[in-house]
Image (tube, grey):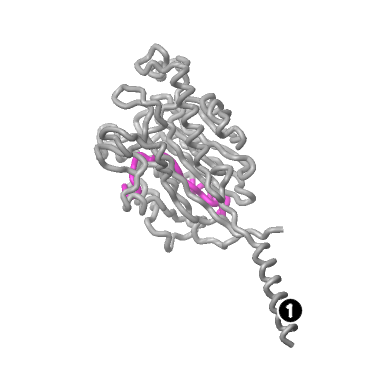
């Protein structure tokens, strides 16, 4: 009798083990990185918007400096891996890029070439000549369409907002990549410009939901505002807590990060968290077999930090006070992880 009971227990344990093995967890990283003035060395802008970043310009931006920055950024991106995302993020939004060629040079670097990252890019009318773009890993994300949206409610030329719709391992999501107008002139004077940018992002999201109410929407970028500022908290309505959002509400997981003193850039000894990834409610409160929010991080890795002087611990930028530092960017990257349960075959 005892042997029979032991055999029965063994069968039950084996059955449980097989069941557990048939169920697993998938993770997908969604990142954003301001690449800080990633210009090539060629004076190819008819309005001389890139003259500063040429060999004869103020920065004396030559091939040595350019390729060093490309290498540094490729290495930084290669470190965006986790044990559950060994090939890095599925999607990486980027800003402050001059053209598609700098992204082509970036993804071809040996540190990340094995990921076979693909590029979405569009030339914006920005007065400084910089654009937003998106890199994606085709093993995880398939692009369906790309649209670009002009911010006409401001009295100057700025970056277009890029909306990329696609399939993240079978589930439709849309990523709206942003670089909102700067704080030039001060926060109070410039705030209406970013509120207008937020309104455009909200309008894009609403139009997506009119066509497909189930699509997940991610708004990311260098927003030049913090999570509690009016553009994010009021115009987008992005909440600090992931509760009672509704499917088409927004949750901002980086609000709590800033509350904890964690930022993506520093100004006058104070941290800001401009580089945000904001997610729709249907990517928060959703069945376990659908993509849903798991975690948010500022990727403030030690090698990205300055180690000397009054900028110790801040992002190690390319230039400081006119001196070439051979750094990475004046912003830390940010990332969220999405998770879902899957049946293993």
Q: In which quarter of the view is residue 340 placed?
A: bottom right
Q: Which of 87 and 235 is in front in this view?
A: 87
Q: Could you say which is closer to the camera, residue 54 or residue 45? A: 54
Q: Quadrant of the N terminus?
A: bottom right
Residue 19 image position (x, y, % from top left): 68, 67
Residue at left offset 44%, top offset 60%: 245
Magenta span includes 223:
yes
Residue ranking furthest to the bottom: 1
Query: What residue do we see at 45% from left, 43% from top?
Result: 220
Question: Looking at the rendering, in which quadrant would you find the C terminus?
Answer: bottom right
Reading the image, the residue beneath label 1 is 7
User: On screen, 182 above or below 28?
Assistant: above
Q: Is residue 171 above or below residue 184?
A: below
Numbered disc total? 1
Sort mark 1 into few (<14), some (14-19) or many (20+) by Cα contacts within 10 Å.
few
- Give the answer, above or below, for where 103 lies relative to 188: above
Magenta span? 205-229
Q: Please state if 222 lies on the left or on the right of 292 as rendered.
A: left
Foreground residue, 134 or 302?
302
Residue occupying image coordinates x 51% and y 47%: 207
On the image, the x and y values in percent for residue 142 come to 63, 42
In this picture, residue 317 sits left or right of residue 116: left
Whether 84 is among the magenta residues is no
Where's residue 272, x and y in %? 32, 43
Label 1 sits on a secondary structure element that is: helix
Provide residue 297's location: percent of width, then percent of height: 43, 48
- Residue at horizontal 49 percent and vertical 27 percent from the top: 70
């Amino acid at each position: 009798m005892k042997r029979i009971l032991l055999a029965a227990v063994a069968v039950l344990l084996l059955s449980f083990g097989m069941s557990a093995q048939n169920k697993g967890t998938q993770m997908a990283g969604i990142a954003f990185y301001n690449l800080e003035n990633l210009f090539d060395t060629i004076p190819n802008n008819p309005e001389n918007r890139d003259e500063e970043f040429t060999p004869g310009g103020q920065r004396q931006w030559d091939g040595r400096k350019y390729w060093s920055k490309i290498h540094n950024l490729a290495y930084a991106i290669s470190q965006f891996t986790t044990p559950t995302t060994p090939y890095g993020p599925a999607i990486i939004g980027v800003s402050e890029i001059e053209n598609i060629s700098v992204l082509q040079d970036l993804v071809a670097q040996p540190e990340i070439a094995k990921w076979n990252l693909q590029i979405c890019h569009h030339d914006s009318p920005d007065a400084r000549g910089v654009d937003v773009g998106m890199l994606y890993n085709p093993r995880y994300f398939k692009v369906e369409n790309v649209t670009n949206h002009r911010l006409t409610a401001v009295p100057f030329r700025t970056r277009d907002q890029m909306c990329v719709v696609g399939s993240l391992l079978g589930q439709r999501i849309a990523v709206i990549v942003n670089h909102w107008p700067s704080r030039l002139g001060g926060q109070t004077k410039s705030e209406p410009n970013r509120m207008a940018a937020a309104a455009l992002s909200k309008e894009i999201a609403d139009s997506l939901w009119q066509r497909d109410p189930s699509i997940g929407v991610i708004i990311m970028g260098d927003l030049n505002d913090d999570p509690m500022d009016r553009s994010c908290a009021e115009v987008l309505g992005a909440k600090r807590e992931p509760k009672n959002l509704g499917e088409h509400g927004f949750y901002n997981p980086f609000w709590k990060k800033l509350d904890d003193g964690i930022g993506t850039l520093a100004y006058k000894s104070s941290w800001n968290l401009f580089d945000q990834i904001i997610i729709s409610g249907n990517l928060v409160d959703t069945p376990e077999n659908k993509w849903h929010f798991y975690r948010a991080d500022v990727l403030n890795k030690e090698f990205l930090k300055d180690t000397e002087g009054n900028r110790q611990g801040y992002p190690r930028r390319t230039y400081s006070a006119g001196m070439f530092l051979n750094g990475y960017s004046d912003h830390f990257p940010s990332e969220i992880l999405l998770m879902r349960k899957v049946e293993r075959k």
